[in-house]
Image: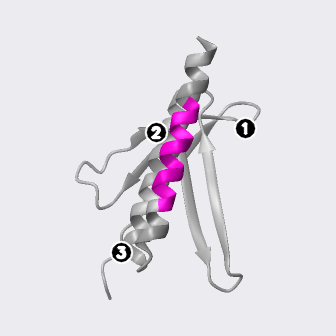
Amino acid sequence: MSKVSTIQIQVGLDEQKVPESIQWSATDNKDEQMMKAKGMIVSFWDPAEKAALRIDLWTKDMMVDEMADFFFQTMMTMADTYARATPYRDQAEDMRVFARDFFKKFQEKQEAEQ
């Protein structure tokens, strides 16, 4: 049997079941201690249903600028993954262009509000 790695996620909820804390650990992590996070996006591909299943959570203290940065970095990572997994580098670059435009528009909104 090949090696098995385990990822553990703990979500602390308030009385209204709103996430207050997110912590995770992985058996391949050298520290093997729980790491704090303010947000998470986890996707699984269900081949039988041909559908993406997802879990997206964020803590109530995650700021809007942190969310925008989180989405920008996630989209850039998705583009990198798509470029590695397919021969369609042009589409990966399209995703990067969109991510940069998304973040630029966010920054412009922030500047306009100040």
Query: In this picture, which residue range is highlighted in magenta?
Result: 94-106
Q: Nearer the viewer, mark 2 or mark 3?
A: 2
Q: Report the residue at 44% width, 46% height from top.
A: 73
Q: Please tell me the numbered disc located at residue 37.
A: 2
Considering only order in the chain, which callout, 1 or 3, is on the residue closer to the N terminus? 3
Outermost residue on the top side: it is 114
Please state which of residues 14 and 43 is positioned toward the viewer in this rendering: 43
Q: Amino acid at mark 1?
A: Lys
Q: Please tell me the numbered disc located at residue 4.
A: 3
Asked if residue 100 shows in the view, the reply is yes
Q: Please tell me the numbered disc located at residue 17.
A: 1
**In the depicted structure, whether residue 72 falls above or below residue 80:** above
Asked if residue 22 shows in the view, the reply is no
Q: Are marks 2 and 1 in contact (CB under 8 Å)?
A: no
CA gap, disc 2 to disc 1? 17 Å
Q: Report the residue at 40% width, 70% height from top.
A: 83
The colour scheme of the drawn protein is one colour
Mark 1 crowdedness (10 Å alpha carbons): few <14, some 14-19, many ≥20: few
CA gap, disc 3 to disc 1? 32 Å
**In the depicted structure, whether residue 94 falls above or below residue 98:** below
